[in-house]
Image: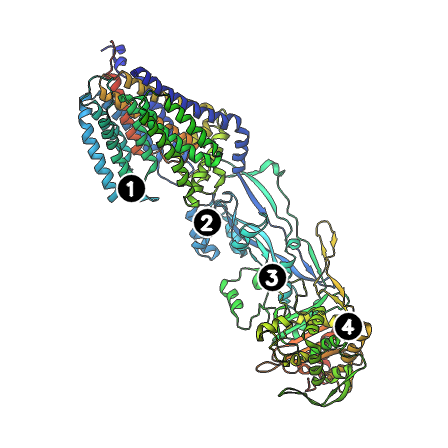
C-alpha cells in the first residue's frame, strides 16, 4: 500500500486534532495543578490515558463496521447494568453517586453510556432501512426516544443533570439525520426555546417571552402541515412558556437565586456565581496573547476550585490568551466538522448515524463547557472533551473518535 | 430534504456556536482585558491591615489613666498556609486546631491573601519562635498591636469600660464596612461611647504576590498604601487621686459613689462596687476566667451608679419640698404640724419624733416624716410626676457611659395600670412623700438632682469627657452636653438648701456627725427600706455658699444614711476640696460619729 493510499483510508486530520488537544490537556492540567495542594499527578495520568486512548482509537478504526454494529447492543446493555450498579455500589461524591472507585481511579459509567447509547440508536435506525436517505417513522422515533431515556432515567437518580443534557442533545441531530421532517424538528426545538426565554424574561422583562412566542407561532404556521398539528405545537409552546414561568415563580428563593446567578453571577458572588466571576476574570485578563504558560495568576493561585476538571478552559484563556483560545476552538471545530463529514460520506447507515451522534456530543460539550466558563451559560458540570482531567471521559471521547475514523476508512469515495 | 442540506444545517449550527463563543471571547479578552486584568491584579495583592493605636485617656490633672502597651498578635494567611502545620501552630499558641479551622472558615469569602487573626497577646517567646522559623511556617505572621494598660492604683472599671473582638452579629449590622473579623471594638463604658474617636482609622499595606503566592514586595512601591491614623485622646474630668481614694473607701463594700462638679456636670469620681480588673479584658484572658466574672453572683459587671433603682428614702425630701413650693401647696414660710404619726382611713404611718408645727428647713434637718406624708398626700400624683420629671427623674440623665437605667417615677397611668382606674389607695402618695413605695432612682439621677439644687436649678448632664484631642493634628474638640435651667424662684432653692445645711450643721441635724469647721458641707441622709439591712443613702454638696462638688453615696445593706453614706460622702468632698490632702477617714475617725437616726 502506497503512502497516498494509506492516507486515503486514514483520517490523519482527526488523529492530529485529537493528539493536539490531548497534549494541550496535559500541559493545561500540569499548569492548573502545579500549585494545588493535591499531590496526585493528574497530568501524568492524563498523558498515559491519552496515549492509551489514541491507541484504542486507532484500533477501533480498523475494526470491521459489522463488528461494531453487533457489539452495540451488548455495550448498551452493559452500560445500563453499570448505571444500575453505580447507584448501589458507587461512591457518593458531593451528593452524586456517579463513580466507581478502583484503586485510586474513578470510573464514571455515564461517560461510557454516552458512546453505547449513540451506537444503539445508530444500530436501531440502520437495522432494516434501505439506503441512507430514508424517512423516519413515528414508531422508530418513539423507540429511539425510549433507548435514550432509559440511561437518562438512571443517571437522573445519581443525580447528574449535566450529563443527562448531553444524552438529550443527541436526539435532534440524529432525528434530523435519520430523516425526520423539518416540521417535527421545529416542533421539538420550539418548546425548549420558549421555556428558556420564559426564564430569561424574568430578568430581561416579560416582553421577551411574548416576542419569542409570536415569532415561533408565525414560523410554525409557515410550514405546510396539517392545521391541528400546527395548533398542537403552538399549544405545547404556550404550556412550556407559561408553565416554566409558573414553576419559576413557585420555586424556593434559593433555587431562584441559583437560576438568577446563571444570568447574573454578581447576584451571588460568594455562592454559585463565584466560579463564574473568577473564571471570567481569568479568561478576560488573558488578553490577546495570554500571560504566558504557568504565569496566570488566577490559575496558579487557585482562584477557581478544581480547575483541572470542568474549568480547564480558564487556564487556556488566561495563559494563552485570545489566540490560544481561538486555536483551541478551531481544533474542536475540525473534529466536529470532520465527524459530520465522515458521517455524510460513510458507506453504512450505522456509521453515518453514529458519527452524527458523536459530533453532537462533542459540540454540546464544547458549547456548554466554554459557554459556562465565559459566563453566557449556566454552570453545568460537564467536561471539555480531551482537555479536562477525567479518565472515563477521555477514554469515551477517544472511542467516539475511533468510530469516526472507522467511518472515514469505510466511506463512499472513488479511490 | 437531501442529506447534503442536513449536513449543511449541522455544519451551520456548529459554526454559529463557534462564532458565539469567539464573539464572547472578543468581548472578554480583547475589549474587557483592561478591566479583568485589573481585577486579576487585585486578586494577587495581599492586604495587611495596620491597626492604629487606640486613643489614650487622661484625667483632669493630665495624668494618663488609660494607656497602651505593645502586644503581639499572630495571623494566618489562608492561601499561603500549609495546613499540615496546623497542629504545630495550635500547640504553639495553646489553642485547639478546631479554633484555627473555624477562624479560617469564618473568614472565607474575604480575600484569600488577607491575614486572618488567630490569637492576640501572644507571648514573646512564641513570637521569637515564629520569627526564627519564618521560612518554614508559610503564611504565619505576627504583628504588633497596642493593647490597654491601666497604670494607676484604681480600677474605674465601669468608667473606662473595655473593648472586645467584634461579634458576628455586630459585623453584620454595622453601617459601612470598616470593621472586619477580629477587630476590637468598644463594648462598655467610655471605650464604647467614644469608639469612633478612640479607634482611629486603620491603615493598609499592599504587598504584591507572585503566581506561587510568594510575597514580591510593596505593591506600586507602597504608593497606594494607606497610613493608619491613631485614635484621638480623651481628656476626662475624672480626678484620678479622688477616684483612687473613693475606691479605697468602698473596698469590700457593695454600693455606688458618684461625685460631679455641679457647675458643669463633670464627673469627678465614680465607683461601683464590686468591680473587676479591666486588664483581664485587655489581654488573652481565658474564657473561663472571663466567664467567672460574668457569672459572679455579686455582679461586678453591673454598674450600680447608672443601673440600680432603689427608693431614695429621705434623700427625696428636698424634691418633695420643691414640688410643694412650686405647686403652691406650701410656701417658704408655711408650717405643717408634725405630731409623731399620720393617719389616713384605718392606716397610721409613724415618725421617729414629734416636732410640732415646723417649716420646710426644719423638717429637712430632723427628717420629719409626717411633714412629707402630709405634703405628699396634698400634692397628688399629677403635680408629683410633673415636678419630679423637671428634676430629671424617670428618665436617663444621658451620662456618657453606656447602659443607663431610667429608674421608675410613678404616674397616674402607672397606678391605674396596677390598681385599676381611680381605684388606688391614697396611701401611695403618703409613701411617695418620703421617697418609699414604688419609686426607684439611680445614683446618677440623685447626684444630678443634688447638683441642680446646689446650683439653684442649673441641671447639667453628667459626663466624663472634657476634651477630645486629635493626636495627629492636635485639634481639640469639646463635646457638647446639655445644661438646662429649672425655672423656680431662687427662694425655693434657698429654703431647700437651708434645710440641707441644717442636716449637717444644725443642732438636731441627722448628719451632724460630719460637720466640718474648714469646709461647710450640706446634704441629706436617706434610708431605703429593704428586706434585710437597709440601704444607706447620702446626697450632698460643698462648699455650701459656692458649691464645687456634689455627691451621691449609696451603700447596699449598709444601714442608716448617717451610718455609712454621710461619712463616706463627707470624706470624699473634703478630700476633693482640700486638693486631695485631707483624709477624714484616717485622721480623725471620731469626727464622724454616726447619729443613729434617718
- Let me know if marks 2 and 1 both belong to one chain: no
Do circles 1 and 3 both sit on a common chain?
no
B525 or B573: nearer the viewer: B525
Name the disc covering residue B105, or none: 2
In whole angstroms, how far apart are the C-alphas of marks 3 and 4?
31 Å
Q: Is residue B343 above or below residue A1?
A: below
Q: Is residue A153 left or right of residue B266?
A: left
Are the residues at dot 1 and dot 3 in contact (C-beta closer than 8 Å)? Answer: no
Q: Quadrant of the C terminus of chain B?
A: bottom right
Q: Quadrant of residue B538?
A: bottom right
Residue depicted at 64% across the width and 53% down the height: B196
For label 3, the crowd category at 10 Å Cα-Cα, with few meaning under 14, some 14 to 19 and many 20 or more, is many
Work out how far the residue at label 2 is from the one at label 4, CA to CA, in angstroms. Answer: 59 Å
Which residue in the structure is indicated by mark 1?
A: A157
Residue B25 x %, y %: 47, 26
In 3D space, how far apart are the residues under numbered discs 1 and 3 (Cα atoms)? 56 Å
Nearest to viewer (mark 2 / mark 3): 3
Chain letter for the residue marked with disc 1 in the picture: A
Asked if badges 3 and 4 are on one and the same chain, I answer yes
Residue occupied by mark 4: B454
Q: Are marks 2 and 1 in contact (CB under 8 Å)?
A: no
Picture coordinates of residue A207, whole percent (x, y): 48, 32
Q: Which of the two discs, 2 and 4, labels the residue nearer the N terminus?
A: 2
Q: Quadrant of residue B521?
A: bottom right
**Which residue is labeled 3 in the image?**
B188
Amino acid at each position: 500500500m502506497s503512502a497516498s493510499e494509506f492516507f486515503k483510508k486514514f483520517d490523519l486530520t482527526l488523529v492530529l486534532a485529537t493528539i493536539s488537544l490531548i497534549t494541550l490537556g496535559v500541559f493545561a492540567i500540569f499548569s492548573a495543578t502545579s500549585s494545588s495542594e493535591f499531590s496526585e499527578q493528574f497530568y501524568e495520568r492524563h498523558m498515559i490515558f491519552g496515549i492509551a486512548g489514541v491507541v484504542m482509537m486507532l484500533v477501533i478504526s480498523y475494526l470491521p463496521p459489522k463488528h461494531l454494529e453487533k457489539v452495540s447492543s451488548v455495550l448498551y446493555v452493559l452500560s445500563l447494568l453499570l448505571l444500575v450498579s453505580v447507584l448501589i455500589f458507587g461512591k457518593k461524591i458531593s451528593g452524586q453517586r456517579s463513580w466507581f472507585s478502583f484503586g485510586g481511579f474513578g470510573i464514571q459509567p455515564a461517560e461510557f453510556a454516552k458512546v453505547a447509547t449513540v451506537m444503539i440508536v445508530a444500530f436501531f435506525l440502520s437495522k432494516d432501512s434501505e439506503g441512507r436517505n430514508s424517512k423516519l417513522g413515528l414508531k422508530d422515533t418513539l423507540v429511539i426516544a425510549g433507548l435514550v431515556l432509559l440511561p437518562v432515567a438512571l443517571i437522573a437518580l445519581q443525580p447528574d443533570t449535566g450529563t443527562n443534557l448531553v444524552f438529550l442533545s443527541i436526539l435532534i441531530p440524529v432525528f434530523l439525520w435519520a430523516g425526520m421532517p423539518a416540521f417535527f424538528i421545529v416542533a421539538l426545538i420550539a418548546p425548549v426555546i420558549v421555556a428558556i426565554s420564559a426564564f430569561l424574561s424574568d430578568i430581561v422583562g416579560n416582553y421577551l417571552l411574548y416576542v419569542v412566542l409570536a415569532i415561533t407561532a408565525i414560523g410554525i404556521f409557515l410550514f405546510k402541515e396539517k392545521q391541528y398539528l400546527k395548533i398542537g405545537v403552538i399549544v405545547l409552546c404556550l404550556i412550556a412558556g407559561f408553565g416554566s414561568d409558573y414553576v419559576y415563580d413557585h420555586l424556593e428563593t434559593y433555587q431562584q437565586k441559583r437560576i438568577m446567578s446563571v444570568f447574573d453571577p454578581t447576584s451571588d458572588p460568594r455562592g454559585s456565581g463565584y466560579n463564574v466571576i473568577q473564571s471570567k476574570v481569568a479568561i478576560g485578563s488573558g488578553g490577546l496573547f495570554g500571560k504566558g504558560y504557568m504565569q496566570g495568576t488566577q490559575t496558579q493561585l487557585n482562584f477557581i476550585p478544581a480547575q483541572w476538571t470542568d474549568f480547564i478552559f480558564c487556564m487556556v484563556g488566561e495563559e494563552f490568551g485570545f489566540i490560544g483560545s481561538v486555536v483551541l476552538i478551531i481544533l474542536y471545530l475540525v473534529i466536529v466538522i470532520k465527524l459530520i463529514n465522515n458521517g455524510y460520506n460513510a458507506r453504512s447507515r450505522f456509521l453515518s448515524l453514529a458519527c452524527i451522534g458523536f459530533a453532537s456530543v462533542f459540540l454540546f460539550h464544547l458549547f456548554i463547557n466554554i459557554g459556562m466558563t465565559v459566563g453566557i451559560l449556566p454552570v453545568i458540570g460537564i467536561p471539555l472533551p480531551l482537555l479536562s482531567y477525567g479518565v472515563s471521559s477521555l477514554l469515551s471521547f477517544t472511542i467516539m473518535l475511533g468510530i469516526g475514523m472507522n467511518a472515514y476508512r469505510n466511506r463512499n469515495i472513488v479511490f | 430534504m437531501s442529506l447534503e442540506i442536513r449536513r449543511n444545517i449541522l455544519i451551520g449550527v456548529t459554526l454559529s456556536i463557534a462564532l458565539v463563543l469567539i464573539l464572547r471571547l472578543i468581548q472578554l479578552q480583547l475589549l474587557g482585558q483592561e478591566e479583568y486584568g485589573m481585577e486579576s491584579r487585585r486578586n494577587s495583592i495581599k492586604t495587611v491591615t495596620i491597626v492604629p493605636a487606640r486613643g489614650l485617656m487622661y484625667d483632669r490633672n493630665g495624668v494618663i489613666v488609660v494607656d497602651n502597651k505593645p502586644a503581639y498578635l499572630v495571623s494566618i494567611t489562608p492561601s499561603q498556609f500549609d495546613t499540615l502545620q496546623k497542629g504545630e501552630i495550635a500547640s504553639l499558641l495553646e489553642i485547639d486546631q478546631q479554633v484555627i479551622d473555624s477562624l479560617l472558615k469564618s473568614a472565607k469569602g474575604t480575600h484569600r491573601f488577607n491575614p486572618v487573626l488567630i490569637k492576640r497577646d501572644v507571648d514573646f517567646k512564641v513570637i521569637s519562635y515564629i520569627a526564627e522559623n519564618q521560612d518554614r511556617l508559610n503564611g504565619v505572621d505576627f504583628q504588633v498591636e497596642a493593647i490597654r494598660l491601666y497604670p494607676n492604683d484604681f480600677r474605674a472599671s465601669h468608667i473606662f469600660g473595655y473593648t472586645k473582638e467584634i461579634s458576628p452579629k455586630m459585623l453584620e449590622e454595622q453601617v459601612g464596612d470598616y470593621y472586619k473579623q477580629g477587630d476590637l471594638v468598644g463594648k462598655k463604658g467610655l471605650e464604647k461611647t467614644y469608639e469612633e474617636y478612640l479607634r482611629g482609622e486603620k491603615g493598609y499595606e499592599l504587598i504584591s504576590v507572585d503566581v506561587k503566592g510568594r510575597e514580591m514586595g510593596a505593591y506600586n512601591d507602597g504608593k497606594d498604601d494607606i497610613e493608619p491614623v491613631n485614635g484621638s485622646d480623651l481628656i476626662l474630668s475624672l480626678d484620678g487621686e479622688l477616684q483612687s481614694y473613693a475606691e479605697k473607701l468602698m473596698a469590700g463594700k457593695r454600693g455606688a459613689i458618684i461625685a460631679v462638679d455641679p457647675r458643669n456636670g463633670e464627673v469627678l469620681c465614680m465607683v461601683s462596687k464590686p468591680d473587676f480588673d479591666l486588664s483581664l479584658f485587655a489581654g488573652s484572658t481565658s474564657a473561663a476566667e472571663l466567664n467567672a466574672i460574668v457569672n459572679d453572683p455579686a455582679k461586678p459587671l453591673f454598674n450600680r451608679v447608672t443601673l440600680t433603682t432603689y427608693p431614695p428614702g429621705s434623700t427625696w425630701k428636698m424634691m418633695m419640698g420643691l414640688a410643694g413650693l412650686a405647686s403652691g401647696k406650701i410656701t417658704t414660710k408655711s408650717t405643717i404640724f408634725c405630731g409623731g404619726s399620720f393617719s389616713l382611713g384605718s392606716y397610721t404611718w409613724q415618725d421617729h419624733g414629734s416636732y410640732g408645727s415646723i417649716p420646710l428647713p426644719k423638717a429637712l434637718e430632723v427628717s420629719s416624716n409626717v411633714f412629707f406624708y402630709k405634703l405628699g398626700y396634698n400634692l397628688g400624683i399629677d403635680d408629683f410626676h410633673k415636678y419630679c420629671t423637671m428634676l430629671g427623674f424617670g428618665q436617663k440623665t444621658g451620662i456618657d457611659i453606656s447602659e443607663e437605667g431610667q429608674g421608675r417615677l410613678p404616674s397616674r397611668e402607672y397606678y391605674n395600670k396596677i390598681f385599676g382606674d381611680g381605684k388606688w389607695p391614697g396611701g401611695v402618695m403618703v409613701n411617695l412623700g418620703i421617697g418609699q413605695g414604688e419609686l426607684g432612682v439611680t445614683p446618677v439621677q440623685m447626684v444630678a438632682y443634688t447638683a441642680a439644687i446646689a446650683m439653684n436649678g442649673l441641671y447639667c448632664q453628667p459626663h466624663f469627657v472634657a476634651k477630645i484631642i486629635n493626636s495627629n493634628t492636635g485639634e481639640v474638640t469639646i463635646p457638647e452636653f446639655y445644661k438646662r435651667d429649672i425655672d423656680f424662684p431662687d427662694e425655693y432653692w434657698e429654703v431647700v438648701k437651708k434645710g440641707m445645711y441644717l442636716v449637717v450643721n444644725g443642732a438636731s441635724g441627722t448628719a451632724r456627725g460630719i460637720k466640718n469647721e474648714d469646709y461647710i458641707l450640706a446634704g441629706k441622709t436617706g434610708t431605703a427600706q429593704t428586706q434585710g439591712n437597709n440601704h444607706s443613702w447620702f446626697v450632698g454638696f460643698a462648699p455650701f455658699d459656692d458649691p464645687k462638688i456634689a455627691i451621691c453615696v449609696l451603700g447596699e445593706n449598709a444601714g442608716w444614711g448617717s451610718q455609712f453614706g454621710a461619712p463616706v460622702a463627707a470624706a470624699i468632698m473634703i478630700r476633693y476640696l482640700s486638693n486631695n490632702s485631707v483624709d477624714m477617714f484616717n485622721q480623725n475617725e471620731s469626727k464622724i460619729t454616726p447619729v443613729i437616726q434617718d
